[in-house]
Amino acid sequence: MSDNDSEALREETVSSERPFKGRLLAVRVDEVTLPDGRRSRREVVEHAPAVAAVPLLADGQVALVRQWRHATGQALLEIPAGLMEPGETPEECAARELAEEIGYRPGKLTLLFSVYLAPGYSEEMIHIFLAEDLVPAQAEADEDENLRVVTMPLTEAVAKVRAGEVRDAKTVAGLLAAIGRRGE
């Protein structure tokens, strides 16, 4: 899509209101003017940028976390992830989250990709890294997190993705990108 195509699709915001603001997210309702002059409403979830990392241990294992996700009503197997703090770079956040969640800091971080998680209703962007040359580190876990570290070969984790046993989007995308990058 060219820049002109993008401009031809641009919606102009006429007004905004925030009917909800919580600790994790806010909801904004915008009234917009469409390119043809009609008006519509857009509901937008405002959410801080996030990071996630596929941590590869020296023995070829990947370190995942299993944690309860209230919204889904189940525990999910995921790559370590978290929200960026104000002024924090994606790399700093990834290193902090790895230390907090799995007890390692990366010697090498490679950005695999950055994506919007659900652009139809949210502005949240997530940066997904490959984390290598891990060294033990201590950091305090978030007080409201309860998780278990699970290690397995990267190929086994990808097999779980293909079998439908891993259902977290960032984890599916991150594991597939990591194995693709490694050529396995």
Image (cartoon, helix red, strand yellow):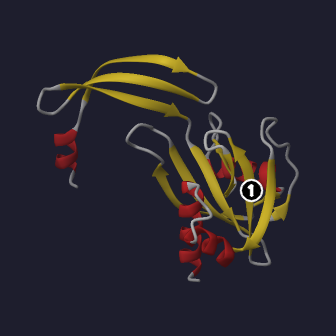
Q: What element carries label 1?
A: strand
Q: Residue pushed farthest left? A: 36
Q: What kind of residue is marked 1?
A: Val
In the picture, measured across the screen, residue 39 lies left or right of residue 92, that is left
Query: In this orientation, which residue lies closer to the viewer: 175 or 2?
Result: 175
Q: Where is residue 125 in the image (x, y as percent from the top left)?
A: 50, 45
Q: Residue pushed farthest bottom? A: 184
Q: Quadrant of residue 144?
A: top right
In the picture, measured across the screen, residue 129 lies left or right of residue 123, that is right
Q: Which residue is rendered at x = 20% and y = 41% of the image?
A: 9
Q: Quadrant of the N terminus?
A: bottom left
Query: What residue is shown with label 1?
Result: 65
In the picture, measured across the screen, residue 141 lies left or right of residue 175, that is right
Q: Which residue is rendered at x = 79% and y = 75% of the image?
A: 58
Q: Quadrant of residue 11?
A: top left
Q: In which quarter of the image is residue 145?
A: top right
Q: Which residue is rendered at x = 74% and y = 49% of the image?
A: 67
Q: Quadrant of the C terminus?
A: bottom right
